[in-house]
Structure formats: C-alpha cells, structure tokens
Image (cartoon, grey):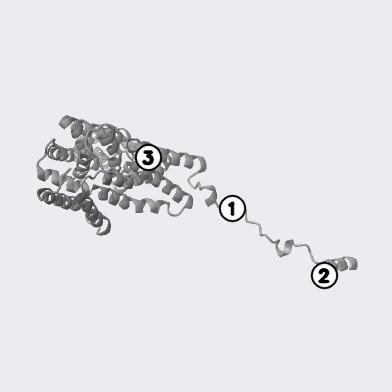
C-alpha cells in the first residue's frame, strides 16, 4: 500500500487519502474508519508532505516499526526518480507521452479526491460529528478559511463535546 | 540553479508519480551536492514530518486514548470530508483551464473526473487502476489521433456543407437566357 502511494499516485498529494482508505480500513483492517479519519487529520495539521500520512497508517498496522517502514517504502520511489532521472528532467518536461498520460490521470485524481469525501463522510458514526462536518464545509468551501485552522477548531469542538458527555467513537 | 532549470524541475516532478513537493526538494538538494546531497536534503524534508506524525499517532491511535484525545480526534476527523472537497475544488479550476479551449478534450476531462470520483466512492482499493487506466487511455487516444483528437459529434464537417437549394449559378438557365444564347449563336 505504501508503495502504491509513493509510486503510483498522480496529481495532488491528497489523492493518497482515497488510495489508502480502501486498503487500510476495508481490505486489511489495520484501523477503524474513525482512526483513519484521525490519521488524515494528523497528516493535514502537521507541516510537511501529505504522503507522511502513510506513517500513521503504518503505525496502526505494526507500531513504530510499521510507521517507519511505511514511510521508507513510500518515499523511496521519489529518491529513485530523482537520483536516476534527475539529469533528464528537462527532456521529461517536453515528453508528449508523459504529458498525455497526466492529461488523463490528473483529472481522474481530482475526481478521486472529491469522490473520497463520500466514504470519509460515511465513516462518521455520531450525530454531532455531522454538525461539525457541516460547519467545516461552510468554513472551507464558502468562507475559504485555512485547512489547519479549521481542523484545529473542529478538534477543539470535539474536546468540548467529549467532556460535555457527547458519545465519542 | 537558474529560474529555467527550476521551472523544468517543477514541471518534471508534477509529471512523475508520487509526491511532487518531496521530489522537488530532493532535486534541489541533488543540484547542490549530488547524490549524497539528495539523500540528506530529502531526509531533511521528510523526517520532521514523519517523526511528528508518529509521535501524534502514539497519542491518537493508542488502544485506549484519554477522553480529550478521543474527542479531539472525533472532532477533527469529522471535518476531513470537507478538507477533501476543498482540496478537489482547489485543483479543479487550474485543471479545467488547460482543456477549456477544445471541446473534445473537455468531454474526456469530464469523463476522467467522473471515473475518478466514482472509483473513490465505490471501489476503494482498486482506485489506482482507474487512475492508471485514465492515463493510459488518454495516452492511446493522443497517440492514435494526435493531441487534437475529438469525438465524432464534436468534429467540424470534413467538407463544406452543401446548400439544400442549388446556388443561383448552378441552376438550369431559364428560357429567357437560353433564348438569348441561341440568338447570339445564330447571329455569329
């Protein structure tokens, strides 16, 4: 799964989220849907590449060693591409085949990112979380607030809700 | 490196599979100090993020985390679907602008977009096959018909459309002109 994320993901870092969700939650049962949502939120609020989220999934699968192995496998293709192909970057940019491939895979990846919102929303189990999602949608899509501040605010609402006695997954 | 080299590297990284920002960071370090520089620079970019995520994973993904951690996770996790929608919307505009001009490519763009969305919503682990399939399909279409390929209903007619009624010059001459031609022939 980590290799798929590191070597086969095209267009936009967030596309790794739908690529990982099926494997981590449904195919291998490394984590629950709620834990996967936590992992994605962690990947978003921390600085650095989104692909680092794979470390959280690896941790859920096999502890710290699993997290480190997952990160190593996910980032190795990037090192390989640059070390082996770095001299030819100029030609790659002009390569019509590479561009044609991305003309197809790019929009599909954007669709996948948008489509991922459905299983991510369906993974919610408590009623109050739907309210948080609606508020976050307004903040992110209509008010164009930042992703990190929205997630931190949603986390703060969650803390208040949990302490107030709301059910927590 | 100069601006041109950086631009080439940026474009090449976005054509490569995998995280483009990471690849660009590794490439910049590679230009500074070769292979060893690439490894050190790349790790400098990646390790802090992975370390931070692992530390937070120990807290958030533990078997029995404290109540406030579970609450924070449930709250932030609830907003993740909106983050996905926002990420897709941010990418949608620039991607559409590249195909806006050509009606055939516009239609294919829409088909790939819908295929990706349906794949993410419905088939999960095999989504990567949809992404690769869309890329290969576009590659084949471009190779077979050239970059300007359009579906049959979007093509311009190959020859000028014939008018339903014959043009004035093509109609059979009426009797007055026939008479005039006969008279001029007789006169000569």
Of mark 1 and mark 2, the one earlier in the sequence is 1
**Where's residue A54, x and y in %?**
23, 37
Image quarter of residue A139: bottom left
Looking at the image, residue B116 sits to the left or right of residue A46; the answer is right
**Where's residue A124, x and y in %?**
23, 45
Please report the residue visible at 12 percent of the width from the left and 44 percent of the height from the top: B69
* Disc nearest the viewer among 1 and 3: 3
Question: How far apart are the alpha carbons under marks 1 and 3?
Answer: 33 Å
Q: Could you tell me if the residues under marks 1 and 2 are in contact, i.e. CB atoms within 8 Å?
A: no
Is A63 placed above or below B151 here?
above
Q: Which of the pair A138/A47 is nearer the observer?
A: A138
Q: Could you tell me if the residues under marks 2 and 3 are in contact, i.e. CB atoms within 8 Å?
A: no
Q: Which of the pair B13/B36 is nearer the observer?
A: B13
Same chain letter for marks 1 and 3 = yes
Q: Chain of mark 1?
A: B
Q: Which of the pair B7/A147 is nearer the observer?
A: A147
Please report the residue visible at 84 percent of the width from the left and 69 percent of the height from the top: B180
| Element type at mark 3 | helix
Question: How far apart are the alpha carbons under marks 1 and 2?
Answer: 38 Å
**Circle 2 residue:** B176
Per the rendering, the mark at residue B131 is: 3
* Numbered label tally: 3
**Circle 1 residue:** B157
Can residue B93 be seen here? The reply is yes
């Amino acid at each position: 799964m980590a290799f798929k994320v590191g070597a086969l993901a095209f267009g936009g870092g967030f596309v790794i989220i739908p690529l990982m969700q099926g494997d981590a939650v449904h195919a291998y049962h490394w984590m629950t849907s709620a834990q996967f949502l936590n992992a994605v939120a962690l990947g978003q609020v921390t600085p650095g590449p989104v692909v680092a989220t794979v470390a959280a999934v690896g941790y859920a699968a096999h502890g710290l060693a699993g997290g480190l192995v997952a990160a190593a496998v996910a980032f190795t293709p990037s090192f390989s591409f640059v070390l082996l192909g770095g001299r030819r970057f100029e030609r790659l940019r002009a390569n019509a085949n590479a561009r044609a491939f991305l003309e197809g895979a790019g929009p599909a990846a954007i669709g996948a990112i948008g489509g991922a919102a459905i299983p991510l929303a369906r993974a919610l189990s408590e009623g109050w979380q739907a309210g948080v999602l609606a508020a976050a949608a307004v903040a992110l899509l209509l008010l164009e607030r930042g992703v990190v501040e929205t997630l931190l605010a949603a986390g703060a609402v969650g803390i208040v809700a949990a302490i107030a006695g709301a059910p927590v997954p | 490196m100069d601006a041109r080299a950086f631009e080439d590297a940026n474009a090449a990284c976005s054509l490569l599979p995998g995280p483009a920002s990471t690849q660009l960071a590794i490439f910049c370090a590679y230009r500074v100090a070769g292979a060893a520089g690439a490894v050190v620079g790349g790790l400098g970019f990646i390790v802090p993020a992975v370390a931070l995520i692992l530390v937070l994973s120990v807290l958030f993904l533990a078997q029995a985390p404290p109540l406030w951690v579970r609450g924070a996770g449930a709250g932030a996790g609830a907003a993740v679907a909106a983050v996905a929608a926002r990420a897709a919307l941010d990418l949608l505009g620039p991607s559409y602008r590249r195909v806006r001009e050509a009606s055939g490519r516009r239609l294919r763009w829409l088909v790939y977009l819908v295929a990706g969305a349906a794949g993410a919503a419905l088939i999960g682990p095999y989504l990567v096959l949809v992404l690769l399939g869309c890329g290969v399909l576009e590659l084949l279409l471009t190779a077979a018909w050239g970059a300007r390929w359009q579906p049959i209903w979007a093509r311009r007619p190959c020859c000028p459309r014939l008018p339903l009624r014959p043009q004035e010059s093509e109609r059979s001459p009426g009797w007055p002109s026939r008479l005039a031609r006969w008279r001029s022939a007789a006169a000569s």
